[in-house]
Amino acid sequence: MQKLVKKNKAVFIGLFFCNLIVAFLTPYILPERYFNDTVIIVFDKGHEIGWFGSYPFVIMFYKLTGLRHLPFFLIALIQFPIVTYILYKIGVPSNFHKLNVKNILVYIGLLLSGIYMSMPTKEFITFLLFCTIPFIFQSKRKPRFKIVFSLVLIACFSFFRPYYLLMPIFAVGMYLVSFIKFENKTFSTIFYGLLIAIFLSLSHGVLRGEYISKQTRENYVTNANKNSINTAIVSPISQDTWYGEAFGIVYGFMAVNVPVVEAIKHILSPQVLAFVIWQLLIFYILFVRFSRCLKNRKQYQFELWTLLILFAYFIVQGIFEPDLGTSIRHKIGLFPLIYFALYYEDFRKDIRQSI
């Protein structure tokens, strides 16, 4: 008896094969600057290999698995099917075959995944780490356990990138603030999340003598090769002062999540404009969903926490990301969460059955 493949899954599989070809060809097409991290991972000239920190761990991973000895096109043929299969197991929305803004954004996300998974990369590890969260939310455990365990797990991910430790802090902080009655609760919740970030950075400055964003993003951009950073995020106000640091964090958040200024700066660069449009639409849809979840937190509790985690990450990006291109690449590492949040309505029935 013949089995018919549903349209939504047929489109998903079709996109997989198309983007698999893209992943296969990417190492032969991308400019050399896109492989700066890959060179560090493969050759480890600085002898950074270890278990703690993004570079040390990812170097260790590719050494132990033997992947660093393979040609990039073979790595693409291994990594991209893995991340696509993970998304498939999270679920394929029933209307995935229909052309609408949300689906097109996800199609582009799959394309970007194919590009960034075509080489040894930290984003592959990040993807594997954060894909656990949707599966936890879809499990049959009690709701409170799933939420607490997810936050603790993300904190544990700080062995890879220390700033992941900030995400549960920002998420819980925004969750508590969301109970306060504001005229515009969505804006206010994110705003207070930014205030928490500013407070932590200023506290770090008092204790350690240098503000977090100044220590990471601004110093990195200043010392980096300008040819390797096309969309550097540089605050117009020096971050040596407390108000400069506060402004820099807000500016960084806007630059990586609502990059209108970046679009104006690179109006003649089609690639940058494409990134900007994708980022703006993703942020807008997530923002609208966040607003809905805050109004119906019981009905959408797992989507609410998914969005709190995502917006916490967006705030973290506002502190640390050196340029727009890097911020987009890093978002692909959290694509399982974005995917889960965008299609939560399709997955909610299964989640309710497990409660």
Image (tube, rainbow, N blue to C red):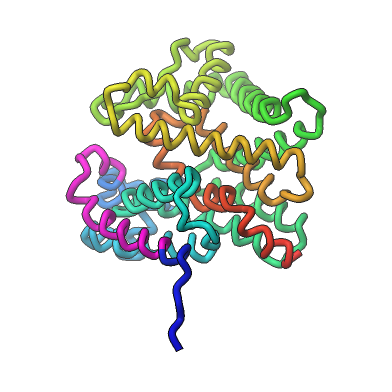
Q: In the rendered image, is residue 56 in sight?
A: no
| Residue 342 versus residue 283 in the image, above or below | below
Which of these two is toward me, 347 or 313?
347
236 is higher (above) or lower (below) than 56 = above
Q: Is residue 12 magenta?
A: yes
322 left or right, relative to 162: left
Magenta range: 11-37
Q: Where does residue 53 sit, x and y in percent of width and height?
A: 46, 46
**Location of residue 135 in the rendering, given as x and y in whole percent from the top left corner:** 60, 61
Nearer to the camera, 18 or 158 = 18
- Identity of the residue drawn at 42% across and 61% down: 12
Residue 216: name its quadrant: top left
Q: Which quadrant holds the N terminus?
A: bottom left
At x 68% / y 62%, what residue is drawn? 349
Look at the picture and state if 125 lies above or below 248. Answer: below
- Report x, y in % for residue 28: 17, 50
Work out whether 327 lies above or below 267.
below
- Residue sitting farthest toward the left: 28
Secondary structure mainly formed by the magenta segment: helix
Position of residue 191 measured from the top left corner of the image (x, y, whole percent): 65, 25
